[in-house]
Image (tube, grey):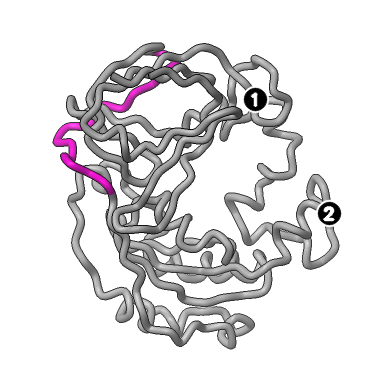
């Protein structure tokens, strides 16, 4: 079987285990069905997710020009505390920013390689946790806009990590933690204007990934340096494909690359 299309992050369904889908313009692949099969990935060209042109991808699926022009990749995306739509102040496109920023957001704890704090739109729970490869997560606060979530994250990351060690996550060198205890310890560090939004629900979300074999020594596949790769798929975790020879491929980091997939 052969498929061709531009890579975007895998779509997921929260089942046991997580179900993964690669969605192309005219087709889709249920990636779980490829486990234990030989998969060949061949890089064909670039296709910017904004302009659609065959221009080298700069970051997050966008060419250089679009990365610095498109509203969906403004600085407030990675740094929510920079959000200004609640003030009526435009960054790149105020109408877009209002839709994205002025909706319920969650500040959460997730455990993938370690316990970390993060921010996501409420509509992206639990998708965000799945994409990070977290095996457990819990909500801390639910706020009405992205700015409040951002200042909460800034305050809490003084007391808990805000990064994931992707190598540890993929090797599954993880320890189950009591996220309820973590959450309650952090409660006192929540900014005053956010304290009323504390989520009293004390239930963790558990996530199981479809992995038959975890890698021991990781080799990260870069399609721009190695335009064609073949290997037996052994697992899917976060946004990574894990192969039998310890090669791992981050689908999300390769958004905007047009590839041909051959399945044997």
Q: Is residue 188 left or right of residue 122?
A: left
Up/down of 189 relative to 121, above or below: below
Q: Nearer the viewer, residue 253 or 260?
A: 260
Q: Is residue 96 left or right of residue 258?
A: right
Up/down of 80 relative to 78, above or below: below
Say which residue label 1 marks: 48
Quarter of the image with the C terminus in it: top left
Q: Residue at x 24, y 27 (%)?
A: 37
- Nearest to N terminus: mark 2 or mark 1: 1
Q: Is residue 152 left or right of residue 101?
A: left
Q: Position of residue 161 (x, y in %)?
A: 37, 60
Count of marks placed on residues = 2
Q: Nearer the viewer, residue 145 or 35?
A: 35
Q: Position of residue 173 (x, y in %)?
A: 18, 51
- What range is drawn magenta here? 210-225
Quarter of the image with the N terminus in it: top left
Name the image quarter holding residue 6. top right
Residue 95's tag is: 2
Disc 2 residue crowd, few under 14, some 14–19, many 20+, Cα 10 Å: few
Q: Is residue 17 left or right of residue 1?
A: left
Secondary-structure class at tag 2 = helix
């Amino acid at each position: 079987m052969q498929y061709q299309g531009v890579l975007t992050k895998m779509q997921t369904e929260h089942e046991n285990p997580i179900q993964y889908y690669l969605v192309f313009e005219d087709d889709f692949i249920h990636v779980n069905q490829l486990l234990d099969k030989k998969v060949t990935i061949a890089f064909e060209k670039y296709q910017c997710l904004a302009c659609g042109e065959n221009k080298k991808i700069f970051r997050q699926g966008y060419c250089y020009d679009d990365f610095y022009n498109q509203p969906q990749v403004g600085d407030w995306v990675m740094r929510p505390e920079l959000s200004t739509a609640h003030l009526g102040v435009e960054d790149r496109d105020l109408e877009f920013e209002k839709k994205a920023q002025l909706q319920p957001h969650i500040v959460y704890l997730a455990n993938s390689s370690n316990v970390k704090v993060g921010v996501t739109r409420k509509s992206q729970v639990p998708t965000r946790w799945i994409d990070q490869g977290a095996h457990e997560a819990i909500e801390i606060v639910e706020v009405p806009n992205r700015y409040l979530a951002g200042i909460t994250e800034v305050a809490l990351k003084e007391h808990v990590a805000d990064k994931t060690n992707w190598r540890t996550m993929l090797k599954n060198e993880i320890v189950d933690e009591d996220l309820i205890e973590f959450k309650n310890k952090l409660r006192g560090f929540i900014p005053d204007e956010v304290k009323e939004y504390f989520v009293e629900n004390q239930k963790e979300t558990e996530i199981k990934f479809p992995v038959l074999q975890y890698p021991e020594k990781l080799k990260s596949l870069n399609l721009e340096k190695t335009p064609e790769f073949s290997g037996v798929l052994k697992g899917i975790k976060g946004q990574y494909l894990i192969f039998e020879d310890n090669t791992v491929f981050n689908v999300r980091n390769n958004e905007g690359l047009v590839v041909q997939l051959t399945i044997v």
